[in-house]
Amino acid sequence: MPTESPVLHERRDGYAVLTLNRPDRLNAFNEAQHLALRAALNECAKDDACRAVVLTGAGRGFCAGQDLFDRDPTILGENPDLGRTLETFYNPLILQLRNLEKPVICAVNGVAAGAGANIALACDIVIGAKSAKFIQAFSKIALIPDAGGTWWLTRHLGEARAKALALTAHPLSAEDAANWGLIWRAVDDEKLMDEVTALAEAFANGPTHAYALTKKAIHAASGNTLEEQLQVERRLQHEAGQSDNYKEGVAAFLAKRPAVFTGKKSR
Ligand code: LHQ
């Protein structure tokens, strides 16, 4: 059994890098990995000094979804209750990533399959190495896409592409995923961590609370009419406009100097 933690938590200046760390199984999730990632994300949420999070994978893959050895009906002697697994582990993880009040960048360093693909898509900004693939592998084992898969695919791509990816388990290249609008960018493999680091450093010096409000507004948009969304923007912009960061941003702009933002909620 590995003695190393299933999630490596590196605290850098202003941001954290969380690395899924079960490379022999392409970082597939067992319960220990779920619990370790949950604890790391909770710490990131509470720590004002952590102003952005990077999620990536150790070894040649990003994440192969559920560790199927742990949910194998033959080993277990009966079919496990997968709804319960989702309720206990995956659904809280997806909401934790989505609702974290700071930007979450996913560096997809290699294959992202099953729930692994959909955990990547739950992050705010997804950058894939060109060699990475996104595979809705579920139909190969007679399951349906979970961890938000049916939601992300349908919202980002529409029904035609969502159904084709889910029903065929077609491996979508990072470049196609970027061209289709499923992820932000695909970059050369050797440039992935440099690009992600530069972005995380920029976020680590940015207006953290404004980022949180931006996430909130964009998440609200898909369920709202334009009139409702304009009200959401009015309410959240009011809040952003009361902050010291806004005062600093305007002062810096007018003085033609770089702004110095804080990670605090200020006011
Ligand atoms: C694995 C896995 C894996 C264990 C590779 N488990 N060992 C949620 C709720 C509850 C239950 C059910 O599911 C869910 C959500 C889900 O995520 S269901 C979908 C689960 N994931 C999959 O079906 C993907 C399974 N993996 C694959 O199809 C392939 O491994 C991919 C396409 C990801 C990569 O293929 P290759 O590059 O050819 O690598 P490989 O297949 O040789 O895998 C490398 C090793 O990793 C290998 O072990 P070994 O000891 O032979 O070297 C695999 O057994 C192990 N591994 N995925 N999910």
Image (cartoon, rainbow, N blue to C red):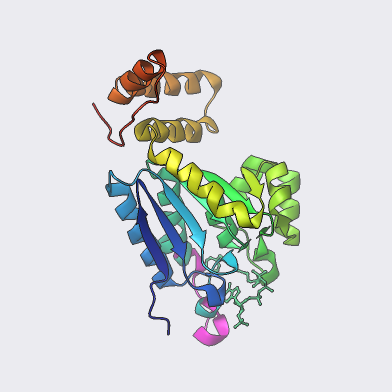
Image-based side of 246 in relation to 119, left or right: left
Image-based side of 228 in relation to 4, left or right: right
Please tell me whether residue 179 is drawn above or below residue 115 in the rendered image: above
| 199 or 20: nearer the viewer | 199
- Residue depicted at 52% across the width and 48% down the height: 196
Magenta run includes residue 173: no
- Residue depicted at 76% across the width and 60% down the height: 168
Residue 77 in view: no
Residue 114 in view: yes
Quadrant where the image shows the N terminus? bottom left
- Residue depicted at 43% across the width and 62% down the height: 89
Q: Residue furthest left?
A: 267
Image-based side of 20 in relation to 187, left or right: left
- Residue depicted at 73% across the width and 48% down the height: 176
Residue 259 image offset from top left, x and y in percent: 37, 26
Image label count: 0
Question: In the rendered structure, which segment of residues is drawn in magenta?
Answer: 71-84
- The picture quadrant for ligand 1 comes to bottom right
Q: Residue furthest top?
A: 254
